Image (tube, rainbow, N blue to C red):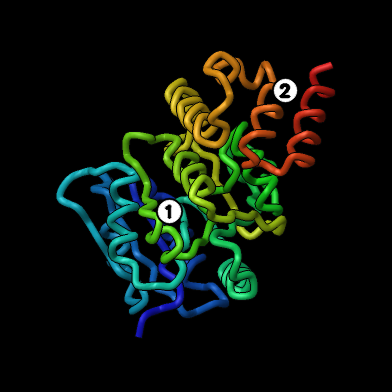
Amino acid sequence: MSPLVSILMPVFKTAPYLREAMDSMLAQTFKDFELIVLNDCSPDNAEEILDIYNDPRIVRYKGEKNAGLSNVLNVGIGMARGKYIARMDSDDISLPNRLQIQVDYLETHPEVDLVSAGMRLFGAKEGTWIRELNPEKVKIEAMFHSPVLHASSVWRRDAFEKQGLHFRQEMVPAEDYDLWTRAMLKGLKLVNLPEVLYEYRIHELQATVQTDKTAAKSREVQMAYLQEALPSLSDKNREAFPKKLWPVFFANLRAGFFDKKLLAKRLYKMSRKRT
């Protein structure tokens, strides 16, 4: 019998934190899952740590060579048997009720295709990340930055598969931002719960760091999203965004992709902040 949830946990250079991540998933109050551990040829003792575990819910994969984050995640998606796919980074911690709350939300909101949760930062930096709950606001926020907290996300496998939506290695390190925008352009609804259910570790070995490449790839995603969502927006005005905001509003009057009132509020708020 297939599990309800398939958890994808890529592993690369995270051995010092791997046991904490593994233990936090195996201790979930929700039990009907498989934990797919994807060792992307990590050059540390990750395999020795994984050998410690003897839980039948763990499914292990190790490639012959390092494939990259998006590629190895796509391998995991291909292996997944669950109705839902959940993400978990191998250097973070999920709170015990995380999966139960997210699965319950998706089960009671069939119109929603993906749900993420709030994150508490710890380690070298502290803070809290919360994203928008309203799927229409999520679409609008995607014009400015990645609107979903990737590592805490859970999504409907069939909804993404029907649209041929997978990660793209060429978009790393903005592969999640790229996937979410393409999903919304296909009509999928993404939401973020305000509850903090995930602890996101900030450390020197971390793969997710802000670099010039991150900024360049994020800008590439941003421009592609605007072009598809607002086809009447001129190249000049698209490239001037977000310095020039209001051409986006008028282009949306034709396209109707974004909620007009919510878009106006967001653009007005941003304009006021600048002045």
When asked about the image quadrant of residue 81, the answer is: bottom left
Residue ranking furthest to the bottom: 1
Q: Would you name the residue on which mark 2 appears?
A: 246
Q: Secondary structure at mark 2?
A: helix
Q: Is residue 150 left or right of residue 16?
A: right
For disc 2, the neighbor class at 10 Å (few under 14, some 14 to 19, many from 20) is: some
| Camera-side residue of 59 and 182 | 182
Which part of the image, by quadrant, shows the N terminus?
Answer: bottom left
Give 216 or 231, whichever is nearer the viewer.
Answer: 231
Q: Is residue 243 above or below residue 265?
A: above
Q: Identify residue type, mark 2.
A: Trp
Location of residue 8 in the rendering, given as x and y in whole percent from the top left corner: 39, 60
Task: Give the CA separation, mark 2 to mark 1.
Answer: 42 Å
- Say the numbered circle drawn on residue 116: none
Query: Can residue 209 be seen by looking at this rendering?
Result: yes
* Residue at the image position 65 percent from the left and 49 percent from the top: 120
| Residue 13 seen in render | no
Q: Residue 99's x, y, as percent?
A: 56, 69
User: What is the secondary structure assignment of the residue under circle 1?
Assistant: loop
* Name of the residue lying farthest toward the front: 254
* Viewer-closest of 67 and 227: 227
Q: Tag 1 or tag 2, which sits nearer the N-term?
A: 1
Q: Amino acid at mark 1?
A: Ser
The C terminus: image quadrant: top right
| Residue placed under numbered mark 1 in the picture | 90
Q: Callout 1: few (<14), some (14-19), or many (20+) C-alpha neighbours within 10 Å?
A: many
Observer-side mark, 2 or 1, equals: 2
